[in-house]
Image (cartoon, rainbow, N blue to C red):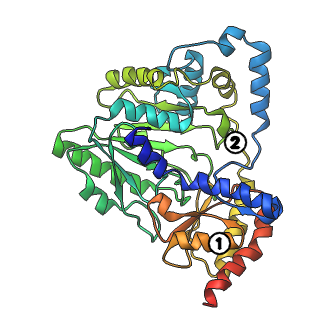
């Protein structure tokens, strides 16, 4: 018999993954070209050439013991130094290798920091819509996820409700910008207001409240949009980063945590995070890809491919009568469903071989997420089906 906690996790297993599996089943029936799978945020843009060159450089030129062996749980010192210097150049910060912990992707990093910070019953606040796995990551350590309801006008955080939700049990706040599933970038004005609320609440309760900034989409932005670097606005900020999207290497599972020296209880947090990295079973981030990414910190995927998809899909869907806030980053459209029940709408869409994820999975019923990190040709093929789907509802 499995554990009670895992029983709940299995029951609430990811709708995104379930839809992805359904796509494979439908492709076997109708042919891959006749199924329009927008379920999974799996990058379609190829990794930049620098990634392959870096991997070959590491394999061919570096000491095999350095390439394949154990290291400090935080990761290789020279890799962490390069990353700290790169962040400092980008954002005018002042980090050193002692502020960087290499992690098994952003998901591994979030689990490490929640393991480090949370006691049973501690509360972690997030803003709907949010990446559904946050609930599981917090639940792994018997914390409680507190969800602030969505602001469906522009999907900036609902800060009035946020302030009301903070209690003396609040340990952390998850911020995800560019956001999955909306693609919205939280403005500097929003971040400053959020920081002011947290500073006030820390004084009111006499507790430390940490921002956990989940940043796998930081480099995927359009139209010259800039993403604020949160450590510059709030001292108790911890950054979780991943190269999954910026280098199109999600399967390599490589990322890092930034734990600034200014955070409250830094010495204990950095020590505990190193232990958490080990005892969660990661031990350390994969050594080969650690070394490789350190040689291509300047490399980025070509976001123009995603931008072409964004423009085509967004403009086409609007012309068919769908409603959507135009995304500024990431590679998702968060579209208002054509009926109140988003799950029922996704089920009807499946009749047209369109696979989308109900907004309920992200804490925002009445919407659906469409991942446009797919081939441009598939989007073109799908448009008549989206038009037929809209007509189905107009004709009701």
Residue that appears at 36% across and 36% down: 141
Residue 224, label in figure: none
Left or right: where 156 falls relative to 35: left
Q: Nearer the viewer, residue 52 or 131?
A: 131
Left or right: where 273 falls relative to 369: left
Q: Which residue is mark 2?
A: 248
Q: Nearer the viewer, residue 222 or 349?
A: 349
Residue that appears at 38% across and 31% down: 115
Q: Is the residue 286 above or below the residue 64 in the image?
A: below
Q: Position of residue 42 (x, y in %)?
A: 67, 48
Q: Nearer the viewer, residue 315 or 251?
A: 251
Left or right: where 108 falls relative to 53: left
Q: Position of residue 158 (x, y in %)?
A: 36, 62
Report whether residue 232 is seen. no
Q: Which residue is mark 1?
A: 349
* Residue that extends furthest to the front in the rendered view of this protein: 1
Q: Is the residue 283 above or below the residue 211 in the image?
A: above
Q: How many marks can you see?
A: 2
Quadrant of the drawing holding the N terminus: top left
Secondary structure under tag 1 reads helix
- Quadrant of res 390: bottom right
Secondary structure under tag 2 reads loop
Residue that appears at 78% across and 13% down: 61
Q: Is the residue 291 above or below the residue 203 in the image?
A: above
- Quadrant of res 49: top right
Q: Is the residue 285 above or below the residue 206 in the image?
A: above
Q: Position of residue 46 (x, y in %)?
A: 77, 44
Left or right: where 172 falls relative to 257: left
- Mark 1 near mark 2, Cβ–Cβ under 8 Å? no
The crowding category of the residue bearing disc 2, from other C-alpha atoms within 10 Å (few below 14, some 14 to 19, many at least 20), is many
């Amino acid at each position: 018999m499995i554990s009670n906690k895992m029983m709940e996790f299995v029951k609430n297993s990811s709708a995104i993954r379930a839809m992805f599996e359904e796509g494979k089943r439908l492709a076997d029936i109708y042919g891959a070209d006749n199924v329009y799978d927008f379920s999974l945020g799996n990058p379609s843009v190829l990794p930049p050439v620098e990634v392959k060159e870096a991997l070959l450089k590491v394999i061919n030129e570096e000491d095999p013991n350095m390439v394949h062996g154990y290291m400090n749980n935080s990761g290789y010192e020279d890799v962490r130094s390069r990353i700290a210097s790169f962040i400092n150049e980008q954002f005018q910060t002042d980090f050193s290798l002692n502020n960087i912990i290499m992690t098994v992707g952003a998901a591994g990093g979030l689990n490490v920091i929640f393991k480090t910070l949370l006691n049973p019953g501690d509360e972690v606040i997030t803003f709907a819509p949010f990446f559904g796995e946050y609930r599981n990551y917090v639940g792994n350590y018997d914390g409680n996820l507190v969800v602030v309801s969505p602001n469906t006008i522009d999907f900036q955080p609902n800060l009035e409700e946020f302030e009301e939700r903070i209690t003396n049990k609040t340990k952390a706040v998850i911020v995800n910008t560019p956001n999955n599933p909306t693609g919205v970038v939280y403005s500097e004005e929003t971040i400053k207001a959020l920081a002011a609320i947290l500073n006030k609440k820390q004084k009111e309760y006499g507790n430390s409240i940490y921002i956990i900034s989940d940043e796998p989409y930081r480099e995927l932005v359009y139209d010259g949009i800039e993403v604020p670097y949160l450590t510059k606005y709030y001292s108790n900020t911890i950054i979780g980063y991943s190269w999954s999207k910026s280098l199109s290497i999600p399967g390599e599972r490589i990322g890092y945590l930034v734990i600034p020296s200014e955070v409250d209880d830094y010495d204990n947090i950095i020590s505990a995070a190193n232990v958490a990295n080990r005892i969660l079973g990661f031990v350390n981030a994969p050594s080969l890809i650690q070394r490789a990414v350190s040689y291509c910190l300047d490399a980025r995927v070509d976001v123009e491919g995603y931008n072409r998809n964004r423009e085509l899909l967004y403009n086409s869907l609007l012309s068919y009568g769908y409603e959507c806030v135009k995304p500024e980053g990431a590679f998702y459209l968060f579209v208002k469903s054509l009926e109140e029940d988003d799950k029922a709408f996704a089920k009807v869409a499946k009749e047209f071989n369109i696979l989308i994820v109900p907004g309920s999975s992200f804490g925002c019923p009445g919407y659906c997420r469409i991942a446009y990190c797919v081939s441009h040709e598939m989007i073109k093929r799908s448009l008549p089906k989206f038009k037929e789907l809209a007509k189905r509802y107009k004709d009701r």
